[in-house]
Amino acid sequence: TLEFGEIKPIEDHLWPLQASEGTVFYVHNVGSSIYVLDKGKKVIAIKSWDGEINYFRCFADALYFSTRANKIYKATFDPPGKIQTTFIRDLKNGETLHAFMLISRKINGKEV
């Protein structure tokens, strides 16, 4: 039986999120940092993104996150000691970013 619960920070503004292959990403959205623990050693992502992290969620084997600069990024863990971050795209004019990294936009006056 699977049980799902609300994601809660483990300390102020530090959120653990697990990717499908087992990697746990720790996101500190106020300090705008990302790290993983690899065999007890903290591996910190080199900040290559623009702005502070505001939304984030794991899908498949990666962490996807957006910044207050309206940009979307992907982070993957490359053992034994690197977090690779990739710029995906800018949020387009008229798009709205929601929790869980969902994006909507208006088409013919309706938000889809």
Image (cartoon, rainbow, N blue to C red):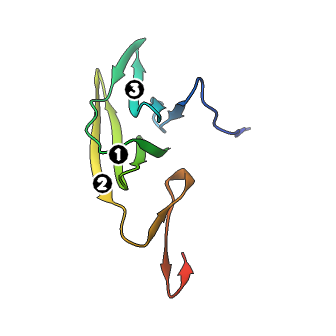
- Residue 76 versus residue 38 in the image, above or below: below
- Mark 1 touches mark 3? (CB < 8 Å): no
Q: Residue at x 43, y 11 (%)?
A: 40
Pointer 2 and pointer 1: residues touching (CB < 8 Å)?
yes
Lower position in the chain sequence, tag 1 or tag 3 = 3
30 above or below 95?
above
x and y percent of residue 72 in the render?
36, 52
Rendered-image quadrant of the N terminus: top right
Q: CA distance from mark 3 to mark 2?
A: 19 Å
Residue 90 locus on image (x, y percent) = 31, 60
| Mark carried by residue 6 | none
Amino acid residing under circle 3? Tyr
Q: Is residue 87 visible?
A: yes
Relative to 19, is 91 on the left or the right?
left
Mark 3 or mark 2, which has the lower sequence index? 3
Q: Residue at x 52, y 35 (%)?
A: 17
Query: Residue 10's image quarter?
Result: top right
Please tell me in which quadrant of the rendered image residue 79 appears: top left
From what the image shows, is residue 95 above or below residue 52? below
Q: Which residue is mark 3?
A: 35
Tell me, yes or no, if residue 60 can be seen here.
no
Secondary structure of the residue carrying tag 1 is strand
Q: CA distance from mark 1 to mark 3?
A: 13 Å
Identity of the amino acid at label 1?
Lys
Q: Which residue is mark 1?
A: 74
Check the picture and name the quadrant holding the C terminus.
Answer: bottom right
Viewer-proximal residue among 56 and 77: 56
The residue under label 2 is which amino acid type? Answer: Ile
Residue 88, label in figure: 2
Q: Secondary structure at mark 2?
A: strand
